[in-house]
């Protein structure tokens, strides 16, 4: 069996442990051969972007962040951008990807990624490519699995940031706003905010009003050493308003995504009109993606990497591995096309409100 391995979408902690798990078990238990596809699906479209992936390549990568194969969130074979006559145009080159897959002599492909990467994998599977998937994203927004690897590490980094902001906020009696990732799903803001003891949490699933937030800050201002911590998802927005966009992807079709940013500043500017306290905004940004994976993410990614080979062995193509009730199981790749969101009436939101957290609703 000769398998290709690619990592697509944004990088996250745990990709290298998963690659290691796939290759080590594949070679040692099954005698499989592996080909590393570089920079996501771009490696199936552009020439000279595939290489042998051996046991030697996996040595020492368990604690490393990022991915030794490189990644891209821009190379969609169904909407690939080319420059023709000085202009960028999009074309469906999925036939090129399928041909490249065959030229490499692959019996199957392991696609590691989030909703975008796995949705593309599902479509390529419909065209005849034999694919199995492994879910990753720091946003934890894939419906088919209880948790994606990368999320635990990012959540811990966000929680540490909240902890660190507490000391400086208390020292200066300020309102500190922390903007974290979460374009459509607010899991990072919600769980790190609760874990870090935030006073206000703003997420995309609950459009906020300024008045309840001002009231919360005013109640805290009655204390002797008053300060407030606000955690904001990058996709959070005021009721009746719009998602904040710092900049678009540019004018190159298929070569970028809309980059959200400024949600923290929008909230801070709205509050500045109503309160006298000093407000400072911190944007955590790509620090959430960088660095080595936590023990939990190393373990989950390694389990995914080992389990996905069982799918290959059993011919269970067009499926991905998933965590369900602490067991690793197989679910159809089509599940990756479904989005997972925070339930505004769910247990954690209700409990957070019971702890005094304001969501601006």
Image (cartoon, grey):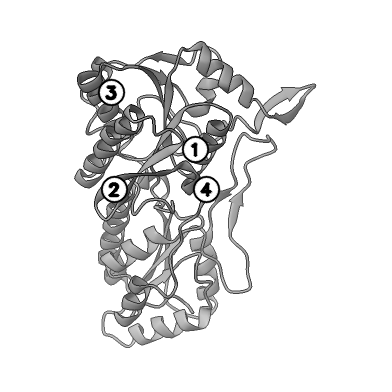
Q: Earlier in the sequence, mark 2 or mark 1?
A: 1
Q: Few, some or many C-alpha atoms within 10 Å of disc 4 (few <14, some 14-19, many ≥20)? A: some
Q: CA distance from mark 1 to mark 3?
A: 20 Å
In front: label 1 or label 4: 4
Residue 301: quadrant of the picture = top left
Q: Residues within 10 Å of mark 2 (few under 14, many from 20)?
A: many
Circle nearer the N terminus (1, 3): 3
x and y percent of residue 11 in the render? 40, 37
Residue placed under numbered mark 3 in the picture: 23
Residue drawn at the location 68% of the way across and 36% of the way down: 253
Q: Position of residue 81 (x, y in %)?
A: 67, 29
| Residue behind mark 1 | 117
Given contact means CB atoms under 8 Å apart, are the residues at marks 3 and 4 in contact? no
Query: Residue 39: horizontal and vertical position, in percent?
Result: 47, 26
Q: Secondary structure at mark 4?
A: helix
For marks 4 and 2 on the same chain, the one whose residue lies earlier in the sequence: 2
Front one among 105 and 216: 105
Quick check: marks 2 and 1 in contact, CB under 8 Å? no
Q: CA distance from mark 3 to mark 4?
A: 27 Å
- Residue tagged by mark 4? 337
For the question of whether residue 86 can be seen, the reply is yes
Occupied quadrant, residue 241: bottom right
């Amino acid at each position: 069996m000769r398998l290709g391995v690619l990592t697509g979408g944004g990088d996250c902690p745990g990709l290298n442990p998963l690659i290691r798990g796939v290759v080590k078990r594949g070679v040692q238990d099954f005698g499989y051969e592996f080909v590393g596809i570089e920079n996501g699906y771009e490696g199936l479209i552009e020439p000279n972007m595939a290489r042998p992936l051996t046991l030697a390549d996996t040595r020492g990568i368990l604690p490393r962040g990022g991915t030794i194969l490189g990644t891209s969130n821009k190379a969609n074979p169904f909407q690939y951008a080319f420059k023709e006559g000085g202009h960028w145009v999009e074309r469906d080159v999925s036939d090129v990807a399928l041909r490249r897959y065959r030229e490499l002599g692959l019996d199957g492909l392991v696609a590691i990624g989030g909703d975008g990467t796995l949705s593309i994998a599902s479509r390529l599977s419909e065209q005849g490519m034999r694919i199995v998937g492994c879910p990753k994203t720091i946003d934890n927004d894939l419906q088919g699995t209880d948790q994606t690897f990368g999320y635990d590490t990012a959540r811990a980094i966000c929680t540490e940031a909240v902890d660190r902001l507490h000391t400086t906020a208390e020292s200066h009696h300020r309102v500190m706003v922390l903007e974290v990732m979460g374009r459509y799903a607010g899991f990072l803001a919600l769980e790190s905010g609760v874990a870090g003891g935030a006073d206000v949490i703003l997420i995309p699933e609950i459009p906020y009003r300024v008045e309840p937030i001002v009231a919360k800050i005013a109640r805290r201002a009655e204390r002797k050493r008053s300060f407030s911590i606000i955690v904001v998802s990058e996709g959070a927005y005021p009721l009746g308003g719009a998602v904040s966009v710092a900049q678009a992807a540019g004018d190159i079709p298929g070569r970028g995504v809309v980059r959200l940013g400024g949600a923290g500043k929008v909230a801070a500017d709205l509050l500045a009109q109503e309160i006298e306290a000093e407000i400072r905004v911190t944007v955590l940004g790509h620090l959430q993606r960088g660095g080595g994976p936590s023990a939990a993410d190393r373990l989950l990614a390694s389990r995914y990497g080992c389990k996905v080979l069982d799918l290959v062995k059993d011919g269970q193509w067009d499926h991905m591995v998933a965590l369900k009730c602490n067991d690793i199981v197989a679910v159809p790749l089509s599940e990756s096309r479904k989005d997972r969101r925070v339930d505004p009436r769910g247990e954690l939101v209700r409990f957070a409100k019971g702890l005094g957290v304001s969501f601006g609703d």
